[in-house]
Image (cartoon, helix red, strand yellow):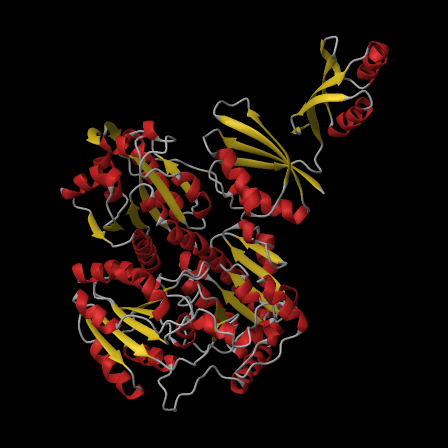
Amino acid sequence: MLTILVVHVENHPGVLNRVASLFRRRGFNIESLAVGRTEKPGFSRMTIVVDTDEGGATRLEANLYKLVEVLQVDNLTSAAALCRDLAIIKVNLKPESRRELLELARDLGARVLRETSEYLMLEATETEDKIDSLVERLSGYGILEMARTGRVAMRY
Amino acid sequence: MRMKQTGSEILLESLHREGVDVFFGLPGGVVLPLYDALYSSGVRHLLVRHEQAAAFAADGYARATGKVGVCLGTSGPGATNLITALTSAMMDSIPVVALTGQVPLHLIGKDAFQECDTIGISMPSTKRSFLVRSAADIPEIMHQAFKTAVSGRPGPVLVDLPKNVLMESGETTYLNERGMEKKECIREWTDADLERAADLVLDSRRAVFYAGGGVIASQAWDELRELAELTKIPVTTTLMGLGGFPSDHRLSLGMLGMHGSYATNQSICNCDLLIAVGARFDDRVTGRLKDFSTLSKKIHIDVDPSEINKNVRIDVALVGDARQTLRALISAIQRQTDQAPAPAARQQWLQRIESWRGEHPLTYDKYGHAMKPQYVIETLCRHAAEDAIVSVDVGQHQMWTAQFWKFRQPRTWLSSSGLGSMGYGFPAAMGAQLAFPDRQVIAFVGDGGFQMTLNDLATVAQYRVPVKIAIINNRALGMVRQWQEIFFEKRYCDIDLSYAPNFAKLADSYGIRGVRVDHRADVEDAVRDLLSDREPGLIDFWVDPAENVYPIVPPGASLAEMVVEPPRVLLEEEALDDLWAV
């Protein structure tokens, strides 16, 4: 089961290392990890997606709290929360498929960042499964490059 | 008050303010400024012969006192030599602060001479580690380091000190209380949880207390005893918990697990309630997990929430300090003693345990000609003072001491239990002796483990640290030999230690009185003689090399399948399969 943990940490050197080490040491595999600044200076917010059950999540939470730099852990797995992934995708562009591609992008909520004669650069900020289906639909045209952030989440 | 001092002076002042009276270390390049400040400082420092001994000594000091033990190594190898001992302290939750030298800040990352990534290396072996970037930060960081080491679940902390930080002048303020309030994940139990626990205790007929190192760490021994006596529930302790409950108490079951007694393990298998206090359901305790104490409900009292449901499913978890929690549980039970089961039920349970004890008592060949290691340990125990501190290394002698020593007081037992690090016993004894110069400190060591840290005989001789060393010498890596004998069809491979120094003469050469004892008949006199003075001393006991530790729960077997005595009992297929996984 995919578990979503939002972890508030002090922004010190080595904190990411400690958090990642903890997951490795306790035998959990991180599916995705997104870190960034928050509204409070000096603090970072990590959204960590990990494949584990409820018991595993509880133990992870307890272990995270043992890191001195961790201030708060919030398990959003079954909470009412907003989850978003950001993807930037370069799709192969051929004149004959241009119109179709642009329509597809619009229908699936992707924004055109740049267009050249070779490719279309798209950005999508969506839930993970919507981005997955966008990727699937685009793959027929040839994806040249893709970057995804991993999930970020916030309680309603 | 603001003062201008060098980083080294600030560090020593901070140590002093944290109550450090002695620390253990070995100088080197980048910590020279610190040793220069030490030259004219009041803090006592013991020069060890290897940094690992410094950290083990700090650990021994901490276990014996409950205070933070402090050790120091220079950068690079000095720091890496500390790591085994810090890992051991981490596993056993022992408060230690390790100070390490580091190359100057501007050289970090440049592969400078004796540079290593101490912070990176120490991360999994410590509760927290700090790199100090400015002399002015030292008081704050040291305060946090000491606080972190003792708070919640205790453990080691490392402070990495670049040379330029030790040398630079800094203006700083010392405050005894900094009010650096950090979050603690203490999801304390509710009254309802406590009532549920009290109900389980009152409803139980065949309950057992299972007490671990947390009882020692939180000083909960009086509460444990009070609750046990109030409820007439017997107490078993883990290797870490020895001393937390008096061995000669009528409710004492001694140690459980792999080398626990038959009666104790049977009581775990048959109990209807298991009350774990500051213990972590280690594999050496539980045996095969799926068959561990299947008939019981479980209460788990622990300060560390990440221990709850880690290995064993818990019915009622009381996360919190063991002492406070036991105190609350006592009150809750006293409020409803009218609901206690008929004393007859409790009495019947104790009688049943007694009959198991009668079936297979914890014993050895007491009357034969051979000098049995257990006899040596029992004899020392008989002659030792009531408050003697006993330190052990790792292996057979450790288990025999755990089985046959009579523990009368808490904080008299020093053992690298979780990590099982050979070489621990002797330097840890040294650390405990520094904390209590007037008490007897006895180090039981094997001939294998002793050869890992015997270089510190020089330290003991130099400072006249009056530790008493008892070598249980069986001319082999005994525990490995035992496993090869039992589980690997006597294919003895690389366990022969007959090529070894004459330990008595070796001690003599360090200026320590050394004696060798070959015959059972000489043990008594030699022990009396060893304990008669306040000088360091060593006895090399050439014990029966064939003696094995029994009973034993084979790795991967359940507690019920324990092998009570030689010869080998055939294991189940599954147990043999599991053996390879352990």
Of B2 and A57, nearer the camera is A57
Front in this rendered view, residue A28 or B570: B570
Q: Is residue B235 left or right of residue A87?
A: left
Determine if residue B159 is in view.
Answer: yes
How many marks the image carries: the answer is 0
Whether residue B384 sits left or right of residue B482 in the image: it is left
Residue at position x 62%, y 67% in the image:
B292
Residue A47 at x, y percent in the picture = 61, 32
The image quarter in which residue B429 lies: bottom left
Answer above or below: position of B435 versus B256. above
Residue A105, position as x, y percentages in the image: 80, 16
Residue A89 picture quarter = top right
Quadrant location of the C terminus of chain B in the rendered image:
bottom right
Question: Do we see residue B288 in this rendering?
Answer: no
The answer to which of B547 and B143 lies nearer the viewer is B547
Q: Position of residue B535 (x, y in %)?
A: 18, 68
Q: Relative to residue B12, is residue B230 drawn left or right?
A: right
Q: Quadrant of the N terminus of chain B?
A: top left
The residue at the far left in this view is B40
- x and y percentages locating residue B352 in the rendered image: 57, 82
* Residue located 54% across and 43% down the image: A22
